[in-house]
Image: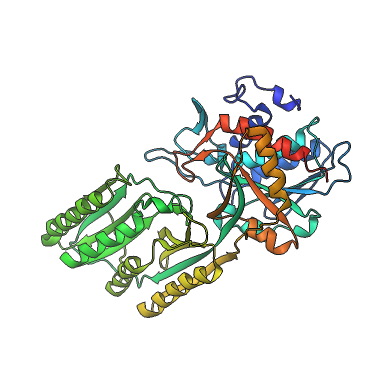
Amino acid sequence: MTTTNTDKSTNRVLGDVEPREVTFFFEELSGRQRCSQNEKDAADYIAAFAEARGLEHHRDKLDNVIVKKPGTEGYEGAPTVILHGHIDMVCKCDEGVTHDFSQGVRLKLDGERIRAEGTTLGADNGLGISYMLALLDSRDIPHPPLECVMTVMEEMGKVGGDNVDLALLSGKRMIDFNWIEERQLLAGCSGDVTCRIDVEAGWQAPPEGRTALLIDIRGLLGGHCEFDIHFERGNAIALLGRLLRRAMATGEIAIARVSGGVQNNVIPAEAEALILVEPGAADAVAQAVRALAEEIRHEFRISDPGMRITVDRPEADVERILSPQAAGKLVRAIALLPNGITNQNLEVEGNWETSNNIGLMVTTRTGVEITCTITSAVTSRKHAVLDQMMMLAELAGEGVSARQIGLDAPEFPWNPDSRMLEIAKDSYQRVMGERPEVLVSVCSLELGMFTQRIDGLDTIGIGTNLYDLHSPKESMDHTSAARVWPLIKDVMRNLHR
């Protein structure tokens, strides 16, 4: 063991799980609040960790943390390497589960997998932070000077990566640990931009004597809007739009509220709408919606076999409804928004180039907000989809608007002359006994923010096998982590010049 801290394994779920230097810190982080926008508890832990070891560290008002460690003996003058991961996680509960994420997540072992009980696990990217903490804590791993950058709100539009003070860094080499495939070395990735469509409600008092119907969609697989978008899984928000349109075609309805999804970069697995209909038309509307629901379940029988769509008559006290004009514009906007893959990548075989995810829909005080994430390896294609949404809002007319929110994250371009990639490939061959797959990914990470702002930065990503990200089914293969940790240490040893 390279740290006294990891000796404290009594009664720990991961106490005997290798690599213990890493799983110790993963369990420590898992016991702390790490939901996007609520990373203070975890940042407090990291800052205290650095102070206890006398390591230089910097923390900004967002809770981004940078920790520096000098090179070990013989590596003091080696070029500095930047290490990166993000502190935050997507916080989502399984259906029927209530959980207080301020207490972290409850870990469990399932054979070779580590999971959380009823929630997302947060290995994305708690594992990456754990690798860095293990390196910072080590006493016997040769390495060059380290600059560990741990960002926040990555899952909420890469806010941390956009705001972290890169002037604090001197390194021109970088390893990112926010990757999910052991067999791959990441050598490039896409960028993304977020668009929000606002539909003003024009709130009105509900008509008297109406019957309430609740259209509810559950049981979709959902998943990550980049890694899983090619599986053609159902998007609960898009499907709800279809069901509402069928309801409107059957009888006069009023929309009291709509909702769907948990985060803009997660494929929504659930959505619902509360509508009011005339009592004499309630059965016909419900029957029409159920008929379309049956067709939809057939469409998605392979990708989402557990899909459930129900139409019930709840006891509901409705105080307001969208105006008929607003309701019509909302339903048409949902139906016309692009969703899924829009372009294949003709340079990288097997990759898709551009996609959009209708990720989140909420009813607010003023109306309905729909938030989408557009991902692309080509900036102009990304902006073309964004412009398409702007034009859709213009065509919808008064009361509908669209705008970019947050930053425009750039892509991390492939560098065929990367020295870091060659070092990592050689280490992979030594440790794993085979050559790695070199990947230019369809996903959007924070790496473009570093490569665009640090001139000459040579960057790669190293991953561990993670599954079902951004969903309560998320898991981490700890045997993969046990294989990757020696790879990371070998790369460190070979960064002496």
Where residue 129 appears, x then y in whole percent?
66, 41
Q: Where's residue 110, x and y in %? A: 48, 26
Q: Residue at x 81, y 49 (%)?
A: 80
Q: Quadrant of residue 257?
A: bottom left
Can you say whether 268 is above or below 324 in the image?
A: above
Residue 330 point in image, percent of width and height: 33, 68
Q: Is residue 6 left or right of residue 279?
A: right
Nearer the observer, 490 or 355: 490
Q: Splitting the image into 4 quarters, where does residue 96 fall?
A: top left
Q: Is residue 336 above or below residue 165?
A: below
- In the shown orientation, is residue 361 left or right of residue 422? left
**In this rendering, would 468 be left or right of 17?**
left
Q: Point out the image quarter for the N terminus.
A: top right
- Using the rendered image of the protein, determine whether residue 387 is visible from the camera's viewpoint: yes
Task: Give the residue displayed 27% in from the left and 72% down from the top.
Answer: 324
At horizontal 57% and vertical 33% (from top left) the residue drawn is: 480
* Residue 156 picture location, percent across and down: 55, 56
